[in-house]
Image (cartoon, rainbow, N blue to C red):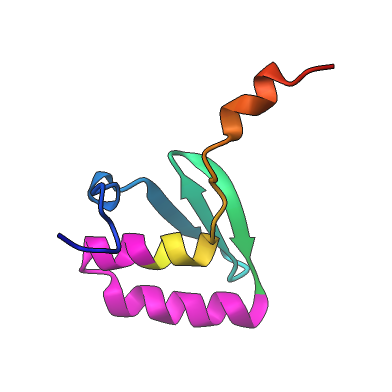
Amino acid sequence: MSKIDKRNRLNEEPFDYQITKKGTVVIYYEDKQIKIIEDKEAESLISRIKEVEDNITALQLLLAKITGNFKRGNEKIGKNKRK
């Protein structure tokens, strides 16, 4: 079992990306926009995406690492927040 993806979430392909005409990269998680990458960082990311394009798991892992730790498991608490 891989230590990176213990629950096999990346096999479900939750991440997607779009490269715009301006050269920015928009990253989506489950069809929700979560990050926009611009300038030199976008150029670097585009070249890295092209390297792993044919390996779906590697592409998903790359996008997951770029987005960082945006989900911490406490997202539902915000709905029930005390006033």
Q: Which residues are magenta?
A: 39-61
Where residue 80 sits: x, y (%)?
68, 17
Q: Where is 16 relative to 19, above or below?
A: above
**15 in relation to 60, above or below:** above
Q: Position of residue 49 (x, y in %)?
A: 38, 73
Spot the residue most to the left.
Answer: 1
Location of residue 74 (image quadrant) = top right
Q: Determine the image quadrant of residue 12.
A: top left
**The C terminus: image quadrant:** top right
Q: Is residue 60 left or right of residue 1?
A: right
Q: Is residue 1 left or right of residue 73?
A: left
State which quarter of the image contains the N terminus: bottom left
Instruction: Name the residue at 53% across, 46% down.
Output: 71
The reply, left or right, for residue 59 in relation to residue 43 is left
Task: Please identify the dominant SS of the magenta region.
Answer: helix
Between 80 and 14, the residue placed more toward the observer is 80
Q: Is residue 48 magenta?
A: yes
Residue at image point 20% right, 63% down: 2
Query: Residue 59's spot in the image, x, y percent?
Result: 32, 65
